[in-house]
Amino acid sequence: MSDHKIETIRVHRILIPAKAVHSHGSGDVAGIHSVIVEITTDTGITGWGEASPWPVFTGTAEGAAAALHVHLRPHLIGEDPVQVEKHMAMADRMLIANSEAKAALEMALLDITGKISGLQVCELVGGRLRDDMGMSFSVANPDFDADLEDIAKMWEDGVRIFKFKTGFADHSFDVMRAEKLREIYGDEIDIRIDYNQGLRAYDAVRCIRDLEQFRPTFIEQPVKMHEREALAHITHVIDTPIMADESVFDPKGALYGAQIRIADIFSLKIMKSGGIRRALEVAAIARAAGIEVYGGCMFETGLAHAAGTHLMAAVPDLHLQAEFYMATYYASDDILVDPFPVKNGRIHVPTGPGLGVDVNPDKLAKYAVAEVLE
Ligand SMILES: [Mg+2]
């Protein structure tokens, strides 16, 4: 029990334009459409959370705003913010799915708990096992020449991990891009491939085998999210490690995924699992099954990135590094007071109590696309 009570919950919906459209096997995305939740206690402490939905993947921003304001808020006012699991269990009872809204709620509660206790969020969920991690940028501009220019600039910045998005145009376009990247950057570039469900199961193996010659570190989600047995088959027959993203959301999905050996790697995302602690449960199942984990992100501001880095700081094993490039290299602006910490191609886990980042209210107002709900 703490001496603090939740007094107000404000829900902001924002849209930050992207520097360039990103294309995926599941469609184009031109900006970050997020819901920011601001929870304040009767003692004047504010915690921040973000829901970053992707309509073809997890849900919608409009739905996340309604989940937080209409369905969860009435059960939280007057409650003790540090009783995180109690509130998350309530959220699971009140609402099916809505993993992004649940992630935002947990983020804000952990931010408050950290500010009350003086501990960082990674310390609240197990401890800080690393201070930084390699950053992967997603190469997803349909104009590949523009991407090559961006990659060259990021290379200067020290970025060496590039995950390129495939399956949104011809197979020959995917092969050409993989070949070109290997040709220009040799062995120094760490190439990963993400189909975002873009292949058809019947000839997925053939397409993937064509790309294996360019030595990708992994190949992510080649087939549709519900084609789990097809994904397990691909994992079984392909030598390159296969990663499940859309097919594994939460601990239940991870358990089934481990049972059928759906993939060699799970992409951890707080927006899929419904928060940091559930993502650590996914990581625990993966670890027990000999499956690697990777730090994924959605179309997020630096706020959700901060939460994601605290998660990945607390994961016991991290060999494949993480994403969290959106705030630096995709969005035209961010909502944080200080720039999200990426230096020399590495993401630095924020320090300071709670999430260790501050939100600039002027930026919330600037990018607002709806009335604040309170
Ligand atoms: Mg993915």
Image (cartoon, rainbow, N blue to C red):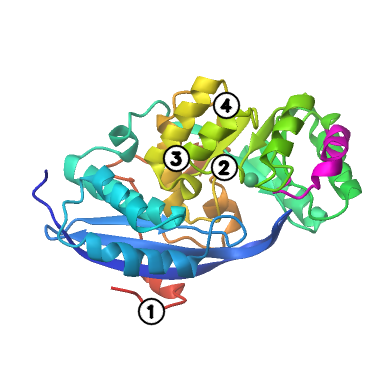
Of labels 4 and 3, earlier in sequence is: 4
Neighbours of disc 1 within 10 Å: few (<14), some (14-19), many (20+): few
Disc 1 residue type? Glu
- Numbered circle sitting on residue 342: none
Q: Residue drawn at (50%, 23%), measured in percent from left and top? A: 287
User: In the figure, 203 relative to 70: above or below?
Assistant: above
Whether tag 2 and tag 4 are in contact, CB under 8 A, the answer is: no
Specify the amino acid type for callout 2: Glu
- Mark 2 / mark 4, whichever is N-terminal: 4
- Quarter of the image with the N terminus is top left
The residue that label 3 is drawn on is: 309
Label 3 to label 1: alpha-carbon separation: 30 Å
| Mark 2 and mark 4: Cα distance apart in space | 15 Å
Ligand 1 quarter of the rendering: top right
Q: Which numbered disc, 3 or 1, marks the residue that appears first in the sequence?
A: 3
Identify the mark nearer the N-term, 1 or 4: 4
Q: Which residues are magenta?
A: 195-211
Residue position marked by numbered label 2 in the rendering = 323
Q: Secondary structure at mark 2?
A: loop
Q: Which residue is mark 1?
A: 371
Where does the image place residue 111, in percent across and percent down from the top left?
A: 29, 48
Q: Nearer the viewer, residue 34 or 161?
A: 34
Distance from the alpha carbon under mark 4 to that under mark 3: 17 Å
Mark 2 neighbour class, 10 Å CA radius: few under 14, some 14 to 19, many 20 or more:
many
Which of 94/317 is in front? 94
Q: Is residue 105 visible?
A: yes
SS at mark 4 in the image: strand
Q: Is residue 109 left or right of residue 166?
A: left
Residue where numbered disc 4 is placed? 292
- Mark toward the viewer: 3 or 1: 1
The question of residue 7 being in magenta is answered with: no
